Amino acid sequence: MDTRVPVPVEVRAAYQHCEQITRTQARNFSYGIRLLPAAKRRALSAVYAFARRVDDIGDGSLPAADKLAALGGARASVTALAGPAADLSGDPVLVALADAATRFTLPLGAFGELIDGCEADVRGTAYATFDDLEFYCRCVAGSIGRLSLGVFGCRDAAVAAPLADALGVALQLTNILRDIREDFSNGRVYLPADDLDRFGAVLVPGGGTELPGGGTELPGGDALEEVVRFEAERARGWYATGLRLMPLLDRRSAASAGAMAGIYYRLLQHISASPSAALRRRLSLSAGEKAMVAARSLTGMTPVALPAGPAVRP
């Protein structure tokens, strides 16, 4: 990477646009991104801004066919960045991302995996087994872990890449548990069917009680709470693997990654401690809790305390 080349005025404005997106929309990740030195902070903000664009397409209100077309356009635009004469068309996110790719070793192809995952959402893909869900998590979150690693830099990329991928899976599993109610209301179920069957839980899109304002009410019951506890324990194993990445990073990058992981792990603890609350409402951390986790990471403290034991396969 070469962060010493001066940033042109128009490119700096593009980065500022991406950083504004990050500050206002990355409610958890922004705490970690802020801990990076300027060049890395700008680059990771550009990565986040494009990823957010893709997510917003997938979660938006367009008809499915239009969403798939828009995702195809996003795929084409990021693929073109690797070409000799990419047409950025004055798009500040693409301008910033293109510049970041010249300064850091960004695996831009990972954005294609993110788009694959969002296309699966649009098509209403269901997950029969955890292996199916793991593949989805690697697409939508492991990809971002590997892109982030390209910004962080590391001592041994061959060792670090699967660990960054595993940390992404851990964070996505936490997201899924946090958003069960909201996703169900929107007709999506990410929990593997065989895990639901194992505990006798029933969660079929469109099978709940219709709400007056739209969407459907999540079915209650002890069985679904047991599924949440089971998946939370599984997520802990992925954190145990992913956090092996920390010693391979420089201090500021480790602090950034540790803050992000620590915030999500703390959220997972809240979900695991009270699955019934997680199924009633969307749990989140206070700004104070997030700031505390970030501060601990910056001082070099381990972001989370994980139980000893075998880690899951990365």
Image (spheres, grey):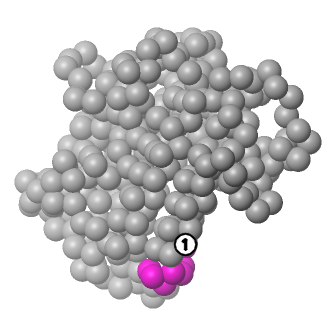
Between residues 16 and 68, which one lies in front from this camera angle? 68
Spot occupied by residue 92 in the image (x, y as percentages of width and height): 77, 54
Quadrant containing the C terminus in the rendered view:
top left
Disc 1, SS: helix
Q: Is residue 35 visible?
A: no
Whether residue 238 is visible, yes or no, is: yes
Q: Residue at x 37, y 53 (%)?
A: 176
Residue 53's place in the image compared with 82, above or below, is below
Q: Based on the displayed image, in which of its 4 quarters is residue 53 positioned? A: bottom right
* Mark 1 surroundings: few (<14), some (14-19) or many (≥20) residues within 10 A: some
Q: Which quadrant is the N terminus positioned in?
A: top right
Q: Tag 1: residue type? A: Ala
Q: Is residue 232 above or below residue 65?
A: above
Which x, y percent locates residue 262? 49, 29
Identify which residue, 133 or 276, lies in the foreground.
133
Q: Position of residue 184 (x, y in %)?
A: 35, 69
Tag count in the figure? Answer: 1
Residue drawn at point x = 24 percent, y = 38 percent: 234
Q: Horizontal placement of 49 versus 302: left or right?
A: right
Q: Quadrant of residue 211?
A: bottom left
- Residue at coordinates 86% horizontally, 28% vertically from top-left? 6
What are the residue bounds of the magenta stretch?
A: 60-66
Task: State the image quarter where residue 148 is shown.
Answer: top right
Residue 124 included in the magenta stretch of the image: no
Read off the residue under disc 1: 70
The residue lying toward the viewer, choosing from 155 and 31, is 155
Most extreme residue toward the bottom is 212
Q: Position of residue 102 (x, y in %)?
A: 68, 34
Q: Is residue 122 left or right of residue 252?
A: left
